[in-house]
Image: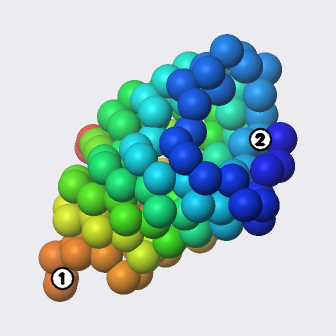
């Protein structure tokens, strides 16, 4: 479902969790406020989630680790903050991750487990000025 670049405003409904067969949800470029409802993670068939270029606040739900079918996650251009949750390391099918232009403060230590990742943008956040990124971390990645 693509609802991008309309004039929608308000918060994202928790009712998206009632769409278990939903594979794509794009609500980019609107004026969506509030936090990301954790219930979105109940749509476990979701492959593409694009909530970019809105006015969303709060933290990225830890429950997003359940979205194991996710290929693309685009949350750039919001005001999301806090730590990037460790649970994001469970998204082993993830190929595209854009969390740029937010207020995230800590990178997940197991980001090297996202072995299918071909695009990663973490620019314009409050991450530490230096961090060590290892592309292959065999000891902490699940099989």
Q: Nearer the viewer, residue 32 or 58?
A: 32
Picture disc at residue 130: 1
Residue sitting at x 42%, y 76%: 101
Picture disc at residue 24: 2
The structure's colour scheme is: rainbow
Mark 2 burial class by Cα count in 10 Å: few <14, some 14-19, many 20+: some
From what the image shows, is residue 65 above or below residue 71? Answer: above
From what the image shows, is residue 133 above or below residue 107? Answer: below
Residue 96 picture location, percent across and down: 62, 61
For the C terminus, the image quarter is top left
Earlier sequence position, callout 1 versus callout 2:
2
Residue 116: quarter of image: bottom right
Q: Nearer the viewer, residue 43 or 118?
A: 43
Q: Is residue 63 left or right of residue 125?
A: right
For the N terminus, the image quarter is top right
Residue 90 picture location, percent across and down: 43, 36
Residue 26 picture location, percent across and down: 73, 50
């Amino acid at each position: 479902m693509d609802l991008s670049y309309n004039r929608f405003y308000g918060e994202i409904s928790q009712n998206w969790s009632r769409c278990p067969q939903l594979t794509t949800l794009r609500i980019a470029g609107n004026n969506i406020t509030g936090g990301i409802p954790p219930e979105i993670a109940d749509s476990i068939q979701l492959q593409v989630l694009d909530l970019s270029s809105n006015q969303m606040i709060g933290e990225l739900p830890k429950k997003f680790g359940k979205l194991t079918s996710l290929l693309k996650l685009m949350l750039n251009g919001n005001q999301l903050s806090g730590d990037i949750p460790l649970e994001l390391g469970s998204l082993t099918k993830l190929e595209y991750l854009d969390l740029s232009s937010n207020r995230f403060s800590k990178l997940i230590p197991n980001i090297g487990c996202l072995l299918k990742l071909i695009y990663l943008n973490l620019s314009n956040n409050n991450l530490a000025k230096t961090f060590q990124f290892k592309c292959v971390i065999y000891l902490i990645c699940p099989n």
